[in-house]
Amino acid sequence: MLRDKHNVIPVTLAGILHAGILAAMIFVFDFSQPAHPAVPLAIKGTLVSEDQIRRPPPPEPEPEPEPDNSEQLRKEAEELKRQEDARKERQRISRLKKQQEQETAEKKRREEAELERRRQEAERQRLEDVERQREENERMRREAEEVERQRLRDREIAEEQARIDAMNSGALARYVYAIQQRIQRNWVEPPSAMAGLECVVNVRQLPGGEVVGATIGRCNGDDAVKRSIEAAVFKASPLPEPEDPTLFERNLRITFKPEQ
Protein backbone atom coordinates (compact mmCIF):
# COMPACT_ATOMS: atom_id res chain seq x y z
CA MET A 1 0.00 0.00 0.00
CA LEU A 2 1.34 3.39 -1.09
CA ARG A 3 1.70 6.11 1.49
CA ASP A 4 0.99 9.69 0.47
CA LYS A 5 3.05 11.85 2.81
CA HIS A 6 2.11 15.18 1.15
CA ASN A 7 -1.61 14.42 0.42
CA VAL A 8 -1.07 14.76 -3.33
CA ILE A 9 -3.77 12.33 -4.39
CA PRO A 10 -6.58 13.89 -2.36
CA VAL A 11 -5.60 17.37 -3.48
CA THR A 12 -5.50 16.26 -7.16
CA LEU A 13 -8.90 14.59 -6.93
CA ALA A 14 -10.32 17.68 -5.29
CA GLY A 15 -8.96 19.86 -8.14
CA ILE A 16 -10.42 17.61 -10.82
CA LEU A 17 -13.77 17.62 -9.05
CA HIS A 18 -13.80 21.43 -8.89
CA ALA A 19 -12.83 21.70 -12.57
CA GLY A 20 -15.67 19.39 -13.62
CA ILE A 21 -18.15 21.39 -11.60
CA LEU A 22 -16.88 24.61 -13.15
CA ALA A 23 -17.16 23.22 -16.73
CA ALA A 24 -20.68 22.01 -16.10
CA MET A 25 -21.65 25.42 -14.92
CA ILE A 26 -20.23 27.09 -18.06
CA PHE A 27 -22.02 24.65 -20.34
CA VAL A 28 -25.37 25.23 -18.69
CA PHE A 29 -24.90 28.94 -18.90
CA ASP A 30 -24.09 28.95 -22.60
CA PHE A 31 -26.92 26.68 -23.91
CA SER A 32 -29.83 26.99 -21.61
CA GLN A 33 -29.77 30.52 -20.37
CA PRO A 34 -33.16 32.39 -20.93
CA ALA A 35 -33.70 35.57 -23.02
CA HIS A 36 -33.97 37.75 -20.00
CA PRO A 37 -31.07 37.99 -17.66
CA ALA A 38 -30.99 35.22 -15.20
CA VAL A 39 -30.45 35.61 -11.51
CA PRO A 40 -26.87 34.94 -10.68
CA LEU A 41 -26.31 31.65 -9.00
CA ALA A 42 -25.22 31.69 -5.42
CA ILE A 43 -22.17 29.60 -6.18
CA LYS A 44 -18.82 31.23 -6.18
CA GLY A 45 -15.89 29.43 -7.65
CA THR A 46 -12.19 29.92 -7.43
CA LEU A 47 -9.77 29.07 -10.17
CA VAL A 48 -7.02 26.83 -9.11
CA SER A 49 -3.91 26.45 -11.17
CA GLU A 50 -2.20 23.18 -11.78
CA ASP A 51 0.78 24.31 -9.81
CA GLN A 52 -1.47 25.05 -6.91
CA ILE A 53 -3.03 21.63 -7.29
CA ARG A 54 0.30 19.92 -7.36
CA ARG A 55 1.86 22.13 -4.66
CA PRO A 56 1.55 20.38 -1.33
CA PRO A 57 -0.28 22.27 1.38
CA PRO A 58 1.89 23.96 3.91
CA PRO A 59 2.75 21.71 6.75
CA GLU A 60 0.75 22.17 9.88
CA PRO A 61 2.75 23.80 12.63
CA GLU A 62 4.02 21.30 15.08
CA PRO A 63 2.64 21.74 18.56
CA GLU A 64 5.04 23.39 20.91
CA PRO A 65 6.55 20.87 23.25
CA GLU A 66 5.11 21.00 26.71
CA PRO A 67 7.63 22.15 29.27
CA ASP A 68 9.45 19.25 30.92
CA ASN A 69 8.54 19.35 34.64
CA SER A 70 9.97 15.94 35.39
CA GLU A 71 13.10 17.41 37.01
CA GLN A 72 11.03 19.69 39.23
CA LEU A 73 8.70 16.86 40.09
CA ARG A 74 11.68 14.67 40.85
CA LYS A 75 13.16 17.32 43.12
CA GLU A 76 9.82 17.85 44.83
CA ALA A 77 9.45 14.08 45.30
CA GLU A 78 12.98 13.89 46.67
CA GLU A 79 12.28 16.81 49.02
CA LEU A 80 9.07 15.18 50.24
CA LYS A 81 10.92 11.90 50.74
CA ARG A 82 13.71 13.71 52.59
CA GLN A 83 11.19 15.43 54.84
CA GLU A 84 9.36 12.15 55.44
CA ASP A 85 12.67 10.40 56.20
CA ALA A 86 13.64 13.26 58.54
CA ARG A 87 10.27 13.02 60.29
CA LYS A 88 10.64 9.28 60.70
CA GLU A 89 14.22 9.76 61.95
CA ARG A 90 13.03 12.34 64.49
CA GLN A 91 10.32 9.96 65.62
CA ARG A 92 12.87 7.14 65.89
CA ILE A 93 15.26 9.33 67.85
CA SER A 94 12.40 10.51 70.07
CA ARG A 95 11.32 6.92 70.75
CA LEU A 96 14.92 5.90 71.36
CA LYS A 97 15.46 8.84 73.72
CA LYS A 98 12.23 8.08 75.57
CA GLN A 99 13.21 4.42 75.83
CA GLN A 100 16.66 5.39 77.12
CA GLU A 101 15.08 7.75 79.67
CA GLN A 102 12.74 4.98 80.81
CA GLU A 103 15.63 2.53 81.05
CA THR A 104 17.71 5.10 82.97
CA ALA A 105 14.81 5.80 85.33
CA GLU A 106 14.23 2.07 85.84
CA LYS A 107 17.95 1.50 86.44
CA LYS A 108 18.03 4.36 88.93
CA ARG A 109 14.95 2.98 90.67
CA ARG A 110 16.55 -0.46 90.91
CA GLU A 111 19.79 1.05 92.21
CA GLU A 112 17.91 3.09 94.81
CA ALA A 113 15.90 0.03 95.82
CA GLU A 114 19.14 -1.97 96.12
CA LEU A 115 20.76 0.78 98.18
CA GLU A 116 17.71 0.92 100.44
CA ARG A 117 17.76 -2.84 100.82
CA ARG A 118 21.46 -2.77 101.68
CA ARG A 119 20.89 0.10 104.12
CA GLN A 120 18.09 -1.77 105.84
CA GLU A 121 20.20 -4.92 105.91
CA ALA A 122 23.14 -2.98 107.38
CA GLU A 123 20.84 -1.35 109.93
CA ARG A 124 19.36 -4.70 110.86
CA GLN A 125 22.85 -6.18 111.20
CA ARG A 126 23.94 -3.18 113.28
CA LEU A 127 20.94 -3.53 115.59
CA GLU A 128 21.62 -7.24 115.94
CA ASP A 129 25.26 -6.52 116.75
CA VAL A 130 24.23 -3.86 119.27
CA GLU A 131 21.73 -6.23 120.88
CA ARG A 132 24.26 -9.05 120.89
CA GLN A 133 26.90 -6.76 122.42
CA ARG A 134 24.39 -5.49 124.97
CA GLU A 135 23.51 -9.04 125.96
CA GLU A 136 27.19 -9.92 126.16
CA ASN A 137 27.91 -6.86 128.29
CA GLU A 138 24.94 -7.69 130.49
CA ARG A 139 26.17 -11.25 130.89
CA MET A 140 29.67 -10.07 131.73
CA ARG A 141 28.25 -7.50 134.17
CA ARG A 142 26.16 -10.15 135.91
CA GLU A 143 29.14 -12.44 136.08
CA ALA A 144 31.34 -9.62 137.44
CA GLU A 145 28.69 -8.69 139.98
CA GLU A 146 28.32 -12.29 140.98
CA VAL A 147 32.09 -12.60 141.35
CA GLU A 148 32.16 -9.39 143.40
CA ARG A 149 29.28 -10.52 145.57
CA GLN A 150 30.98 -13.82 146.09
CA ARG A 151 34.20 -12.03 146.96
CA LEU A 152 32.39 -9.80 149.43
CA ARG A 153 30.61 -12.76 150.93
CA ASP A 154 33.89 -14.59 151.24
CA ARG A 155 35.49 -11.54 152.81
CA GLU A 156 32.55 -11.02 155.16
CA ILE A 157 32.66 -14.65 156.11
CA ALA A 158 36.39 -14.44 156.67
CA GLU A 159 36.06 -11.21 158.65
CA GLU A 160 33.21 -12.61 160.67
CA GLN A 161 35.17 -15.72 161.35
CA ALA A 162 38.20 -13.64 162.33
CA ARG A 163 35.95 -11.50 164.52
CA ILE A 164 34.51 -14.57 166.18
CA ASP A 165 37.98 -15.91 166.65
CA ALA A 166 39.13 -12.57 168.09
CA MET A 167 36.13 -12.43 170.39
CA ASN A 168 36.76 -15.96 171.53
CA SER A 169 40.36 -15.03 172.13
CA GLY A 170 39.34 -12.11 174.40
CA ALA A 171 40.60 -9.40 172.04
CA LEU A 172 37.13 -7.79 171.82
CA ALA A 173 36.78 -7.65 175.58
CA ARG A 174 40.17 -6.03 175.84
CA TYR A 175 39.26 -3.55 173.07
CA VAL A 176 36.02 -2.51 174.80
CA TYR A 177 37.71 -2.30 178.15
CA ALA A 178 40.45 -0.07 176.74
CA ILE A 179 37.81 2.35 175.38
CA GLN A 180 35.96 2.38 178.68
CA GLN A 181 39.15 3.18 180.52
CA ARG A 182 40.05 5.99 178.08
CA ILE A 183 36.62 7.60 178.54
CA GLN A 184 36.68 7.25 182.32
CA ARG A 185 40.11 8.89 182.54
CA ASN A 186 38.75 11.90 180.65
CA TRP A 187 35.55 12.10 182.68
CA VAL A 188 35.08 14.95 185.15
CA GLU A 189 32.59 13.71 187.73
CA PRO A 190 29.87 16.27 188.43
CA PRO A 191 28.54 16.82 191.97
CA SER A 192 25.21 15.24 191.07
CA ALA A 193 26.80 11.89 190.21
CA MET A 194 25.55 9.09 192.43
CA ALA A 195 26.96 5.72 193.30
CA GLY A 196 25.98 2.89 190.93
CA LEU A 197 26.03 5.14 187.87
CA GLU A 198 25.52 3.22 184.63
CA CYS A 199 24.90 4.79 181.19
CA VAL A 200 24.90 3.39 177.66
CA VAL A 201 26.89 5.58 175.22
CA ASN A 202 26.48 5.36 171.44
CA VAL A 203 29.77 6.37 169.82
CA ARG A 204 30.48 7.04 166.10
CA GLN A 205 34.13 6.92 165.10
CA LEU A 206 36.29 6.99 161.99
CA PRO A 207 39.08 4.57 161.10
CA GLY A 208 41.92 5.53 163.42
CA GLY A 209 39.60 6.13 166.42
CA GLU A 210 38.53 9.76 165.80
CA VAL A 211 35.16 10.37 167.54
CA VAL A 212 32.59 12.15 165.36
CA GLY A 213 29.50 11.64 167.53
CA ALA A 214 28.36 10.63 170.98
CA THR A 215 24.83 10.28 172.41
CA ILE A 216 23.62 8.97 175.73
CA GLY A 217 21.07 6.19 175.71
CA ARG A 218 19.81 4.45 178.80
CA CYS A 219 21.26 6.27 181.82
CA ASN A 220 20.41 6.59 185.53
CA GLY A 221 22.13 10.01 185.87
CA ASP A 222 20.81 13.52 185.40
CA ASP A 223 21.52 15.88 182.55
CA ALA A 224 24.74 17.12 184.08
CA VAL A 225 26.02 13.57 184.28
CA LYS A 226 25.03 12.88 180.68
CA ARG A 227 26.78 16.03 179.44
CA SER A 228 29.89 15.12 181.39
CA ILE A 229 29.99 11.64 179.83
CA GLU A 230 29.59 13.05 176.28
CA ALA A 231 32.42 15.49 176.96
CA ALA A 232 34.58 12.66 178.24
CA VAL A 233 34.00 10.66 175.04
CA PHE A 234 35.16 13.57 172.83
CA LYS A 235 38.15 14.19 175.10
CA ALA A 236 39.08 10.50 174.77
CA SER A 237 39.35 10.86 170.94
CA PRO A 238 41.13 9.20 169.26
CA LEU A 239 39.93 6.01 170.84
CA PRO A 240 42.22 3.00 171.17
CA GLU A 241 42.43 0.71 168.14
CA PRO A 242 41.71 -3.01 168.48
CA GLU A 243 44.44 -5.59 168.42
CA ASP A 244 42.66 -7.28 165.50
CA PRO A 245 41.49 -4.84 162.76
CA THR A 246 38.43 -7.03 162.20
CA LEU A 247 37.10 -5.87 165.56
CA PHE A 248 36.90 -2.23 164.44
CA GLU A 249 33.34 -0.85 164.30
CA ARG A 250 32.29 2.62 163.28
CA ASN A 251 29.34 2.51 165.62
CA LEU A 252 30.13 1.40 169.17
CA ARG A 253 27.77 0.76 172.03
CA ILE A 254 29.75 1.31 175.24
CA THR A 255 28.41 0.85 178.76
CA PHE A 256 29.88 3.58 180.93
CA LYS A 257 30.07 2.37 184.49
CA PRO A 258 32.71 4.25 186.39
CA GLU A 259 34.62 2.38 189.05
CA GLN A 260 34.02 3.45 192.64
Image (cartoon, rainbow, N blue to C red):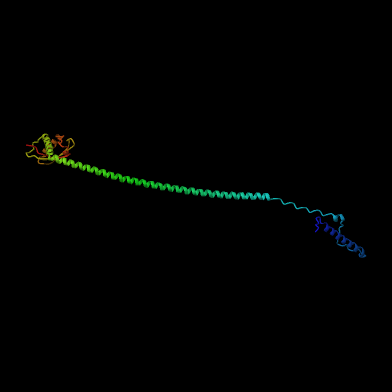
Q: Quadrant of residue 130?
A: top left
- Residue 141 sits above or below residue 234 on the image: below
Which residue is at 62% across, 50% downward? 81
Residue 135 vs residue 237, the one in the foreground: 135
Instruction: From the viewer's perspective, tell me whether residue 189 is left or right of residue 37.
Output: left
Query: Relative to residue 150, is residue 74 drawn left or right?
Result: right
| Image quarter of the N terminus | bottom right
Residue 73 lies, in percent from the top left, at: 66, 50
Q: Residue furthest front?
A: 1
Residue 181 lies in what quarter of the image? top left
Numbered-mark total: 0
**Residue 67 position (above or below residue 252):** below
The one nearer the camera, 94 or 27, is 94
Residue 253 visible here: no
Residue 19 in the image, given as x and y percentages of width and height: 87, 60
User: Would you say 22 lies left or right of 178 here?
Assistant: right
Quadrant of image for the C terminus: top left
In the rendered image, the vertical position of residue 198 relative to residue 29, given as above or below: above
Residue located at (22% from left, 43% from top) = 150
Residue 96, percent across and down? 53, 49
| Residue 140 image offset from top left, x and y in percent | 28, 44
The answer to whether residue 121 shows anywhere in this view is yes
190, above or below 107, in the image:
above
Q: Residue furthest right?
A: 35
Q: Residue at x 45, y 48 (%)?
A: 110
Which sits in the foreground, 88 or 186? 88
